[in-house]
Image (cartoon, helix red, strand yellow):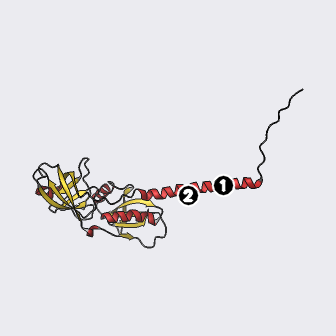
Amino acid sequence: MKKYQFKRFKPFKPLKSRVMTQKNNTRVLQYFIFLTALLLISSCASYTPRVTMPPPVGYVTASWYGPDFHGKQTSSGERYDMYAMTCAHKTFPFGTNLRVTNPVNNKSVVVTVNDRGPFIPGRDLDLSYSAAKEIGLVGPGVGRVRIEHLGRNMRYVKRVEFMPLIASGPFTVQVGAFQEESNALHMKQGLELRYKDVAVASAFVNGNKFYRVRIGSFVSRDGAYSVAQNLADEGYTTFITKAD
């Protein structure tokens, strides 16, 4: 006798069950889209570095810069004076006061950070000509020095400014606007030591050409403010405006 094999069929899902499954799938997709958007928005602010304070005492490699930069604008906005007791550092906030000692001769000088640099690998601190001369570093050019943190001049801390009447994004943070392109590029180079998405763009204002230094493009004003506030704490003049 021929045997028959019966196939097992899955039970038919009721209409209500299928509708609930579709709703659950929709909710999962909506949650995934929300999570992706949240990660994208947070990534705009996640690269915001914290203000770096120097250790109480430490040793760094120092060099100096002089005549080629004399009179040019520093990253803090001040004019570089090779005869003033100042220095450049890659991360310390503007206004940071340091005692710098040359261990070779035990000579010391007190300097204030008002610029970014040095940009040569292996170097940590760029002294002004007079500061380097004071501790006998002009001749050697580069040397190991001892630094002591003496506090900070808080007049360098800035506040965030806003362009009025901007209701929606994208927003950007403007850090400087210069008529000399070299000044804009110098500021960009200093900012890129700590920040991403730094750009220089030219624009005409009242018939004059300016080179604007800007950071990022942010969907929300809060995202732009987070970066701008950190820059202002470092000592940069910041301005939140509409991104082009």
On the picture, is 142 further left or further right than 167? left
Mark 1 and 2 residues: CB-CB less than 8 Å, in contact? no
The residue drawn where x is 41% and y is 71% is 163
Residue under label 2:
34
Badge 1 or badge 2: first in the primary sequence: 1
Q: Residues within 10 Å of mark 1 (few under 14, many from 20)?
A: few
Return the x and y of residue 69 as percentages of the image width and height: 20, 57
Return the x and y of residue 167 as percentages of the image width and height: 48, 70
Q: Residue at the far top: name it.
A: 1
Q: Which mark is residue 193?
A: none
On the picture, is 18 further left or further right than 114? right
The residue drawn where x is 27% and y is 67% is 156
Number of dots carrying numbers: 2
Residue type, numbered disc 2: Phe
Task: Tell us which disc is closer to us: 1 or 2.
Answer: 1
On the image, which quarter does residue 44 sit in? bottom left
The quadrant of the rendering that contains the N terminus is top right
**Secondary structure under badge 1?**
helix
The residue drawn where x is 60% and y is 57% is 30
Residue type, numbered disc 1: Asn
On the picture, is 27 further left or further right than 54? right
Return the x and y of residue 94 as percentages of the image width and height: 26, 63
Observer-nearest of 174 and 136:
136
Q: Residue at the far bottom: name it.
A: 165
Q: Residues within 10 Å of mark 2 (few under 14, many from 20)?
A: few
Return the x and y of residue 195 as percentages of the image width and height: 36, 56
**Secondary structure under badge 2?**
helix
Residue under label 1:
24
On the image, which quarter does residue 27 sit in? bottom right
On the picture, is 43 further left or further right than 151? right
- Residue 165 can be seen, yes or no: yes
Q: CA distance from mark 1 to mark 2?
A: 15 Å
